[in-house]
Amino acid sequence: MIAESSTRRVFLRNLGVSLALPNLESLAGKTGSGASIPLRLGFAYVPNGVIMENWRPSKLGRQFDFPTSLQPLEESRRDFQILSGLDHTKANANGDGGGDHARASATFLTGCQARKTSGKDIKLGVSVDQVAAQAIGHATKLPSLELSCDGSRRSGKCDSGYSCAYQYNLSWKSESIPVPAESNPRSVFERLFGQAEFSQDRKAASRRIKTAGSVLDFVLEDARKMKSRLGYEDRQKLEEYFSSVREVETRIRSKDGASESFADVESPEGIPNAYRDHVRSMFDMMTLAFRADLTRISTFLLAHDGSNRSFREIGVPEGHHSLSHHRDDPVKIRKLSRIDRFYCEQFAYFLKRLSGFREKDGSRLLDHCMIVYGGGISDGNRHRHVDLPVLLAGGKAHGLKTGRHFDYSGKKTKFSPTEIEEIERTKDGFGIPMANLHLGLLEKMGVKANSLGDSTGIARDF
């Protein structure tokens, strides 16, 4: 059955499947493709800080260099910008003592100081993604999509007396309600391509899974009927889209048995054994969600801050958090740089995926996305939350200044230890609150917001 949503998107529906189609010129009257191509907003968070001297380029402008950790992104240098001089001073102790990892992830999208508690009286602030979702989320099937490789926790004691809610959730709907993230790629896929009334479709989804049927198998008849109404380019585009959906579905089904029951969507079944595969599967989910315009807002917590995951596949058997307190040990620093490079490799994969799909005007999907990649700690050894490692990718079609290294501090990119201590002692920060950048991103999305967390203005120079 071919159906339209209230947002004029075309869906193929059958047996609990709701497959949104990309914008097609041949169906302009139905898909609304006569309208401008939407801008998407995404965030990807990496934990425990980075080794800044192997991550931060030494030069500003367009002739910036690629230190070892950033080298996997060199092929995409024209598609992203490095933003220095962004601070999250609300992640500092500010009288609350230990707990920098909890505060780092809590502050990243909110710009707010987390109330130090491990009880039910958690308090933070609304995150930038949810400000956007509340304003424009009605235009898509999902107002926003929250992803993680660590799952979600909304209670319990984690870091130095802080609730686990702060450490495991980037997205906050209100000052006391985090938006839980999904870590199972299979469950995310079903959420994207199941009917909107998800709870009512579990039997249908279970039948698909038990028969080892692809979501595409249940809509192909309608798809064949639709193809007769499409021009050559749209037929090619539809085939490419179906291929990408089947590719991702095949990958996430590979370790699932056909007898799996869908009654428990929280089951860890479907999570790849290899961390690299898990990360890439989740990036694939974000790509599909953006490509089909199922949502325009997404967050991805690659690992919670404070994560002590080991990386044996790249020769680092020690835990990440333990290594981050390296005390200037050169061996540990080299291993941490390998982890930083590993994460950049996964982000490079994501950018290539977004670059591989074309919009109706021939531009790339990446050109209509703004993706922030970074973390709430710069120096993990000293728990510094200023001059953060931040990349901003995409957005060329919407005026973003890609292919450069820009410093919001207006000073320089390297500081002496004495200068760093003085800046942290006075709590002035290196540059501007990262919340200023968030306000600038919201403005690009057409969302009006006068303030967010500790913002002091709207950053527009990106």
Image (cartoon, grey):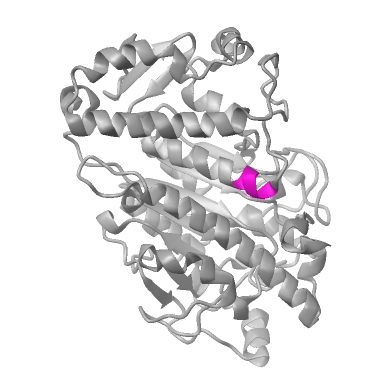
Residue 335 shows in the view: yes
> Position of 253 compared to 22: left or right?
right
Q: x, y (%) of residue 11? A: 34, 19
Say which quadrant the N terminus sits in. top left
The residue at 22%/40% (across/down) is: 360
Relative height, residue 429 to residue 141 (above, below): below
In the picture provided, is 381 more to the left or to the right than 177?
A: right
User: Residue 121 appears in which quarter of the rendering?
Assistant: top right
Q: Is residue 110 visible?
A: no
Whole-percent x and y of residue 112? 59, 56
Residue 93 falls inside the magenta stretch: no
Q: Position of residue 349 (x, y in %)?
A: 50, 53
Q: Quadrant of residue 295?
A: top left
Residue numbers of the magenta segment: 275-279
Q: Which is the main secondary structure of the residues drawn in magenta?
A: helix
Q: Dividing the image into 4 quarters, which one contains the C terminus?
A: bottom left
Please, is residue 24 above or below residue 290 in the view? above
Q: How many marks?
A: 0
Residue at the image position 61 percent from the left and 47 percent from the top: 279
